[in-house]
Image: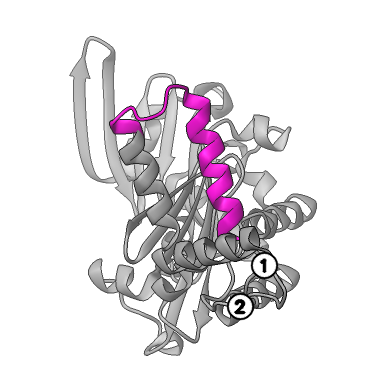
Amino acid sequence: MFDTVNFWLDRVELSGGSPFDTQRYLSELTERQNENGYSCTGKEGDYQINIAENGISLKGSLAKYHLGNNIDTLTRHTAKQAIEQLSDNLHLDISKAKVTRLDISTVIQTKRPPADYYNYLGQKPYFDRLQATKETLYYNNHQRKIIFYDKTKEAKGAGVAIPEIFINNNLLRYELRFTKRLNNQFKANVTASTLTDEVFYKNIIQSWHNEFKTIQKLKNNSFMIEENTTLKKAKEAIIANALQIAGQDYIENCLNDLKAAKCLNNRSDYTKLKADLNKMLVAKNGNKNDLIQELEKSIFITAKYAM
């Protein structure tokens, strides 16, 4: 489930050695001299290594580094092998390095193209929803990001070979990225060695599952009203159905237009309007969508058996 993992290895962890002792093991070395002193950048496999007087930064996909692709991701056991491989090749003890970014992800084989699922994934508390392209859906806050995207199209666009087992399949990538203040989020000092701890691994997989569960799941675009309903409920059902057909982005675009035109006097009014529209959007008219049921089941099974 591990993909991108960025590290910072402080000079104090080098047992008296210099960070620049590592540069001899890098390829594509670039050196710089400026007012901050000497520094250099190089490559070790998929990793970009930046070396300065105060320490070493490592940025890249740990999965791609170890497996040759990042369609497959790392389990707790293969993550340990990857960290050992990186340590051996750089002649550094990476186990002590601080984790500065951590991506938890996997590909889910779906019956339909990934983009077909996005209209049924609604708002998420404390996150901003953004469908950047037809193929990519983001949920952002200041410390974490959630991304759903078409892994097959992304791999083909990057010229990455797709493993034979996945050829001709729809591959939806669900990715949870911890991008800032990891120690604060996990209430622990997260180092490379932490990633292979069994309790930590189980907890982070559960976090990956829980983040998905708190996304609003929208219902079928079917129009169903109970018999002997009220005028108010009929109006709400019609609006809910229209909003579901238009999609979640329609609400965001309308709100952005209202804000740009400064239509409402108070900023809190936009928040209240958004909340009211989202309540209508998830109104009980129709059954839970088959695509959402499929996705929920796949993510539940992945989290249950991920080791």
Q: Which residues are magenta?
A: 259-282
3D distance between C-alphas at marks 1 and 2:
9 Å
Query: Disc 1 marks which residue?
Result: 284
Which numbered disc covers residue 83?
none
Q: Amino acid at mark 2?
A: Met
Q: Quadrant of the N terminus?
A: bottom right
Q: Which residue is mark 2?
A: 224
Please report the residue visible at 37 percent of the width from the left and 90 percent of the height from the top.
168
- Residue 19 position by quadrant: top left
What is the x, y in percent for residue 72?
A: 49, 71
Judge whether 218 appears above or below 152 on screen: above
Side of 269 relative to 137 (left or right) = right
Q: Quadrant of the C terminus?
A: bottom right
Q: Which of the two discs, 1 and 2, labels the residue nearer the N terminus? A: 2
x, y (%) of residue 141? 51, 38
Secondary element under disc 2, as helix, strand or loop, is: loop
Residue 28, horizontal then vertical, whole percent: 21, 46
